[in-house]
Image (cartoon, helix red, strand yellow):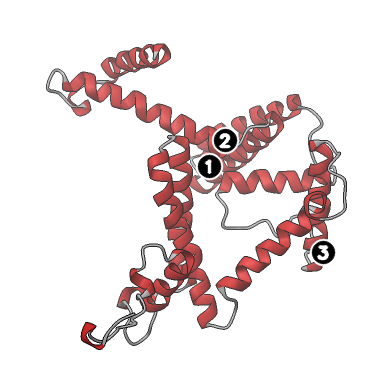
Amino acid sequence: MKNASDGPVHDQAVDPVHDPEGGMPRLLEIMRRLRDPETGCPWDIEQDFASIAPYTIEEAYEVADAIEREAWDELEGELGDLLLQTVYHTAMGEERGFFTFASVANAISDKMVARHPHVFGDESRDKSAAQQTRDWERIKAAERAARAEAGVLDGVAAGLPALTRAVKLQKRAARVGFDWPDIGEVVDKIVEEAGELAAAQNAADPGEIAAEFGDLLFVMANLARHLGIDPEEALRRTNSKFTQRFQYIEERLAEDGRRPEDSNLAEMDTLWDAAKRHFTKT
């Protein structure tokens, strides 16, 4: 027990912003203060849903990139950056009376419980993965109906990466029978679209060239769907492979004190083949 001589007792609560163990409440309070119209950060105060949306997309890709590179020491930070985007949007939603962080968390919790009756309800877990996929689609279809989405393609987000959206649109159409029955017909369509692109190029019509190129990409996305390939993931892997091989070219040229612009296509093509052999071995 303290004596009077021990001096006054100060019962000062720790500011949640500076509490290293504050968790989610700490982050929500940080955002609230950043957005405070009187004392917050001028940049943060000026932002709205549209201005923050590109950062949200970017952060999601950075999470995917860390996973792709198996950079587990970076993943925690990248997930935090992505979580901040949700906090940002919910803070703006609360300011405008749309929703709160709690209501957003409750909404996704309700959705996950409703979509997993075999885990959280009385349905049997004794079903195949294919049956579970059909059940999942049935539940999502009911959700779309509740939102008055009458069209087959309604609800496929326009802001998705184009290849991903193409696959989602094709999957929706395939559910009602609008699909090629086998891969051979998809390949035939690719050949047809490639010919139309070549014809458009010969006609030198920029608008038509772009349109035919889009058609060809759309059919390539359909081929990926039939093959069970994620076209975005496949292209990311190819981008990574290209980067790795081109960096090999730069490194070999640098050994002679040169840069790619000091070389020529024939030499770089030879180095490219060497890079392919090198990375096949490693």
x then y, percent, for residue 14? 35, 75
Residue 123 relative to residue 169: left or right: right
Q: Which residue is mark 1?
A: 209
Please tell me which of labels 1 and 2 falls first in the chain: 2
Q: Secondary structure at mark 3?
A: helix
CA–CA distance between discs 3 and 1?
Answer: 38 Å
Please tell me which of labels 3 and 1 falls first in the chain: 3
Q: Which residue is mark 2?
A: 197
Residue 199 relative to residue 20: left or right: right
Query: Type of residue at label 2?
Result: Leu
Q: Residue at x 46, y 52 (%)?
A: 79
The residue carrying pointer 2 sits among few (fewer than 14), some (14 to 19) or many (20 or more) residues within 10 Å by Cα, namely: many
Determine contact: label 1, label 2, CB under 8 Å.
Answer: yes
x then y, percent, for residue 214? 58, 43
x then y, percent, for residue 131? 84, 40
Q: Secondary structure at mark 2?
A: helix
Residue 212 relative to residue 241: left or right: right
Query: Type of residue at label 3?
Result: Ala
Picture mark count: 3
x then y, percent, for residue 133? 79, 43
CA–CA distance between discs 3 and 2?
Answer: 39 Å
Q: Which residue is mark 3?
A: 145
Q: Which of label 3 and label 2 is nearer to you?
A: 3
**From this viewpoint, is residue 253 visible?**
yes
The quadrant where residue 146 appears: bottom right
The quadrant where residue 125 appears: top right
Determine contact: label 3, label 2, CB under 8 Å.
Answer: no
Query: Type of residue at label 1?
Result: Ile
The quadrant where residue 1 appears: bottom left
